[in-house]
Amino acid sequence: MTCIRILLADDHAVLRAGLRALLDAEPDLEVVAEAGDGLECIEKVLKLSPDVVLLDINMPRCNGLVTLQRIQEEAPDSRVLVLTMHDDVEYLRSVLASGGSGFILKQAASDELLSAIRTVHQGGVYLHPEHARLLAGEAPDQRTSAAPAPLDEKQARFQSLSDRESEVFKLVVLGYRNAEIAAMVFLSVKTVETYKARLMRKLEVRSRAALVRYALELGILT
């Protein structure tokens, strides 16, 4: 079995110790390093190339969002799952806009954390259902009606996408990078970039985070 190599980045040593014990007990997970601040995290990511970085937002020396952006720029193959105590949709938007692959609360159950790590490692985006509803602008106690939604402007824009553009759209919001999408759909990276730029123009969005919100609002990403 190939292990998922994980780097833990949090300024609380006791929390890191507990997380390490939890993760190392799983046969498919391995903690390869720990970091107590943002700069140390970046250095170890560049040195070790972990599969998944479990990253706290509130970090000394270099805050978590800046650390996340640096990792995306300098080590794009490492997926970043943000672990935080802040249950705030604005934090979630910031994480997605910075290139994060997921967002999970520190008070989450152990099984949820393990599932989140495996999800982002496989190329997915992990969002708790409550966060997904908040991101889509739905009230926490609101329930989706069984009746079909009316064809609003966003649905009309999405339906204007070609089959290939729709395919690329779904892979982008699931967290796959251009090179990975190219390999999956048998196209060049440049062609995938062209499709991505074209569909973003049609949907009138400017970032991956906005694409994720678009997918959530239309019920495409669950």
Image: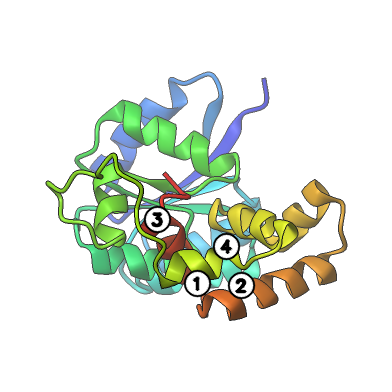
Callout 1 touching callout 2 (CB < 8 Å): yes
Give percent across and percent down for residue 23: 42, 29
Q: Residues within 10 Å of mark 2 (few under 14, many from 20)?
A: few
Circle 3 or circle 4, nearest the eye? 4
Tag 2: amino acid: Glu
Q: What secondary structure is marked by label 2?
A: helix
Q: How many marks?
A: 4
Name the spot of residue 81 as percent of width and height, x first: 43, 51
Label 3: which residue? Answer: 216
Q: Are marks 4 and 1 in contact (CB under 8 Å)?
A: no
Of discs 2 and 3, which sits in the foreground? Answer: 3
**Residue occupying the point 43% across, 20% down:** 25
What residue is pinned by disc 2? 73
Quarter location, residue 74:
bottom right
What mark, if any, has residue 159 been given in the picture? 4
Q: Amino acid at mark 4?
A: Gln
Along the polypeptide, which appears first: circle 4 or circle 2? 2
